[in-house]
Image (cartoon, rainbow, N blue to C red):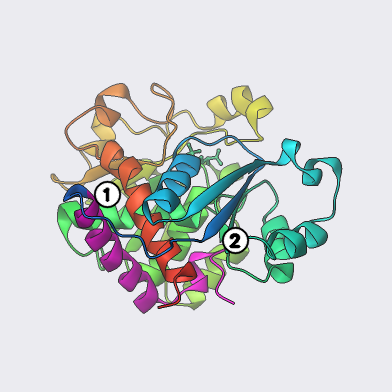
Amino acid sequence: MNHFISLLDITGDEARYILKRAAKIKRKLKEGKPHQPLAGKTLGMIFDKASTRTRVSFEAGMFQLGGHALFLHSTATQLGRGEPIEDSARVLSRMVDGIVIRTFGHDIVQRFAEYSSVPVINALTDLTHPCQILADVFTFEEHRGSIAGKTVAWIGDGNNMAHSWINGAVTFGYRLNIACPDAYCPDNRLLEAARALGANVTLSKDPQAAAHNADLITTDVWASMGQEEEQAIREKAFAGFHVDKALMAKAHPDALFMHCLPAHRGEEVAADVIDGPQSVVWDEAENRLHAQKALLEFLLSPE
Ligand code: CP
Ligand code: NVA
């Protein structure tokens, strides 16, 4: 059973193959040529948290691939009334061909996958957001060519996105410089596991040093979904960890800026950076569609 719960569930070669397919699938869509390898297939999409990009890219993507997507907000299903994850996984996977889950605890997706008879895709947990990295690497490479050997700087919270950038350093072979406040570092076990697999990752509390000569600067909100009540305390902790023009100037002159979105202008990123010439955030958002269509094709198509 092929699940996509972590980037490390697929090999580097498989990830490369998915991005190659994403480019072809994107081209076909732009040329108006239908591509429907998933005709007759259904994707169940369980969301415990809000979403714009992830939900729409999976739902539109599944439709474009010839299939059908079911949006299942947990409060409108028996999951929200306490039906066990193990039971829900066994039931739903007898009816659909793939399942996407966005939730809080990472263990929920893992338990779901254990009992599912169809592929399960992690659409974001508190720990990781692997689908976003597929789109982000795809976007970088569209603009700048291979990301292998390039330097990515992560500025801010050691959160689910930071964790997926760490795993991506194994899969895609870029160097990753992380700058975060002491109390908001990434999970050390995940970091050490990635390093053991060859990831080249530095960790500091110095955004300037992390950004030095970087080819890509990326960041994310200071308070993720579920941490809203920590907003004020986090604003204090992350002062100095925002991406502004001065920080972009430390990077390579043709460095790109990315953000998974939604963004808070004036907090983790200055408006003149996210809306400026080095920012590729709209391509990045669009590429969620193309990268996930390639992922769906890879996991659900018999060929
Ligand atoms: N980047 C991202 O996952 O966006 P949504 O929360 O809107 O899905
Ligand atoms: N770190 C953010 C990412 C949103 C796409 C969150 O989990 O809310």
Q: Please provide the residue range marked out in magenta.
A: 1-29
Q: Amino acid at mark 1?
A: Leu
User: x and y percent of residue 185 in the render?
Assistant: 56, 49
Residue 159 visible within the image: no
User: x and y percent of residue 3 in the render?
Assistant: 57, 69
**Camera-side residue: 19 or 73?**
73
Residue in the picture at 45% in, 76% down: 302
Quadrant in the rendering for residue 73? top right
User: x and y percent of residue 274 in the render?
Assistant: 29, 30
**Camera-side residue: 200 or 107?**
107
User: x and y percent of residue 124 in the render?
Assistant: 56, 49
Residue in the picture at 27% in, 55% down: 34
Of discs 1 and 2, which sits in the foreground? 1
Quadrant in the rendering for residue 266? top left
- Is residue 240 shown above or below 165? above
**Camera-side residue: 154 or 164?**
164
Residue in the picture at 40% in, 56% down: 66
- Dominant SS in magenta: helix
Which residue is disc 2 drawn over? 188
Q: Amino acid at mark 2?
A: Asn
**Could you say which disc has been placed on residue 216 in the image?**
1
